[in-house]
Amino acid sequence: MNKSKRLSSIRNDVETHFKVDISEKRRHRGIVYPRAIYYSLARTFTKHTLTEIGAPLGFKHDTVINALKGTLNDLQYDCIYKDFLAERVEMYKDKETSEETLEQENARLKKEIRVLTMKNTILTGL
């Protein structure tokens, strides 16, 4: 999956579930916690830098660091956010596993097509 597409899909997933715009600058718990979840999921499941993760929301890397350190610790006491984060981590892990499996299957099918094409060439040449 394209890295930027993955980042935007994580953002859309979080914003849709919590019905908030995580790019808002307010420091209300209803925005800060979903934003921290976005940072955590983006950090875990993409290879983006902290600057690249925060940039679409208008935040710098130090804001992302603070959210990852401080806010995520607070999430353990709020079941709604904690459960959502755990659920999404499992879901994204499953997606990565299935994507790898699809890539492996695609490679196998390409090999089979090459073999069949060679066999067909040999048989038609006789």
Image (cartoon, rainbow, N blue to C red):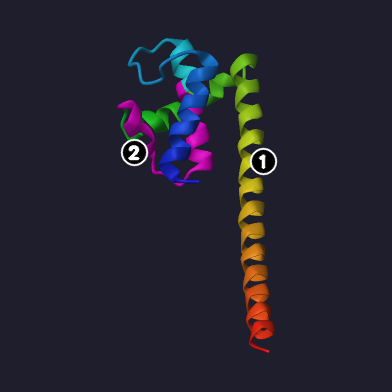
* Residue 50: in magenta span: yes
* Residue 33: in magenta span: no
Residue type pointed to by label 2: Thr
Q: Position of residue 81 (x, y in %)?
A: 59, 18
Q: Position of residue 23 (x, y in %)?
A: 36, 21
Residue at 62% from the left image edge and 73% from the top image edge: 114
The numbered mark at residue 94 is 1
The numbered mark at residue 51 is 2
Is there a contact, CB below 8 Å, between mark 2 and mark 1?
no
Side of 126 relative to 18 (left or right) = right
Residue at 30% from the left image edge and 27% from the top image edge: 58
| Residue 27 visible to an observer of this rendering | yes
Residue type pointed to by label 1: Asp
Instruction: Locate residue 95: give its quadrant.
Output: top right
Residue at 41% from the left image edge and 28% from the top image edge: 66
Q: Which residues are magenta?
A: 35-58
Q: Main secondary structure of the magenta part?
A: helix
Query: Which quarter of the rendered picture does the C terminus lie within?
Result: bottom right
Q: CA distance from mark 2 to mark 1?
A: 26 Å
Q: Nearer the viewer, residue 70 or 101?
A: 101
Q: Secondary structure at mark 1?
A: helix
Residue at 66% from the left image edge and 28% from the top image edge: 87
Compared with residue 52, is residue 73 higher up or lower down, i.e. above or below? above
Instruction: Locate residue 119: give its quadrant.
Output: bottom right
Q: Position of residue 16 (x, y in %)?
A: 51, 18
Compared with residue 30, is residue 51 higher up or lower down, i.e. above or below? below
Q: Secondary structure at mark 2?
A: helix
Determine crowd level at label 2: few under 14, some 14-19, many 20+ residues with C-alpha closer than 10 A: some
Ranked by sequence position, the earlier of labels 2 and 1 is 2
